[in-house]
């Protein structure tokens, strides 16, 4: 009887291992599908057209704004005219708190003033907005922006995207029909 119990314990352990492997494989498949569906596209590869809202489905494909998109919504210029000089702003390290201001560079003879003089151009007042190369993660970028996208702005964008689409819901808020 003792040997039979040991065999049952071994069989049970093997079944548990097999179940764990199957569960792990399913989780890996689900993760791969989610990554493909919600993969990040670099801003320079994104294409925006007037019909951007056609594919908007709040039940399936909402996403976070990128740092550059938030900056645009906050009014930062993202494209500089050809004569403009890109000035140096904040730098971020791992925690996003390391700063270096434009004025510090200018006093030492560096920065935009020196770059403009070296290029033979004039310093302009307009700045091009960009994040430093060391600031590659959205979390760092959001921290630099102060997580300050106004909720009303985000709500208005969603409203504009959904305008023209009529969604009928029941009392519980479940979607009954879309027109």
Image: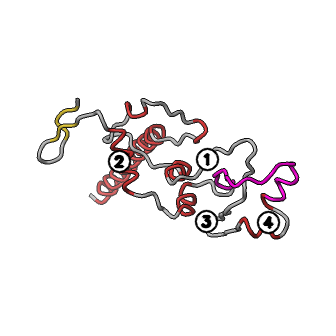
Per the image, label 2 sits on a secondary structure element best described as: helix
The N terminus is located in which quarter?
bottom left
Secondary structure character of the magenta stretch overall: loop
Between the residue at mark 4 and the residue at mark 2, the CA separation in whole angstroms equals: 69 Å
Labels 1 & 3 near each other (Cβ < 8 A): no
Q: Is residue 139 magenta?
A: no
Q: Residues within 10 Å of mark 1 (few under 14, many from 20)?
A: some
Residue drawn at (41%, 41%), measured in percent from left and top? 30
Among numbered discs 1 and 2, the one appearing first in the sequence: 2
**Is 28 displayed left or right of 158 in the figure?**
right
Residue at numbered disc 1:
78
Residue at numbered disc 3:
96
Between the residue at mark 1 and the residue at mark 3, the CA separation in whole angstroms equals: 21 Å
Q: Magenta part of the protein: which range?
A: 113-133
Q: Nearer the viewer, residue 8 or 148?
A: 148
Q: Position of residue 47 (x, y in %)?
A: 53, 33
Q: Position of residue 32 (x, y in %)?
A: 47, 40
Q: Position of residue 38 (x, y in %)?
A: 46, 41
Q: Position of residue 115 (x, y in %)?
A: 83, 55
Please identify, in this view, whether the residue under mark 1 or under mark 2 is nearer the observer.
1
Labels 4 & 3 near each other (Cβ < 8 A): no
Between the residue at mark 4 and the residue at mark 1, the CA separation in whole angstroms equals: 22 Å
Per the image, label 3 sits on a secondary structure element best described as: loop
Mark seen at residue 15: 2
Q: Residues within 10 Å of mark 2 (few under 14, many from 20)?
A: few
Q: Is residue 124 magenta?
A: yes
Q: Residues within 10 Å of mark 4 (few under 14, many from 20)?
A: some
């Amino acid at each position: 009887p003792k040997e039979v119990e040991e065999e049952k314990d071994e069989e049970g352990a093997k079944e548990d291992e097999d179940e764990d492997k199957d569960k792990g494989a399913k989780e890996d498949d689900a993760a791969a599908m989610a990554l493909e569906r919600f993969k990040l596209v670099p801003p320079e590869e994104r294409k925006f057209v007037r019909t951007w809202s056609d594919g908007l489905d709040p039940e399936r494909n909402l996403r976070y704004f990128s740092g550059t998109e938030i900056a645009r919504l906050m009014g930062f210029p993202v494209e500089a005219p050809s004569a403009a000089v890109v000035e140096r702003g904040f730098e971020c390290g791992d925690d996003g708190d390391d700063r270096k201001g434009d004025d510090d560079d200018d006093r030492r003879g560096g920065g935009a003033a020196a770059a403009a003089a070296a290029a033979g151009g004039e310093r302009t007042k307009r700045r091009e907005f960009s994040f430093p190369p060391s600031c590659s993660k959205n979390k760092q970028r959001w921290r630099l922006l102060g997580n300050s996208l106004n909720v009303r702005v985000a709500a208005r964008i969603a409203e504009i995207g959904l305008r023209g689409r009529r969604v009928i819901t029941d009392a519980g808020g479940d979607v009954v029909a879309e027109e």
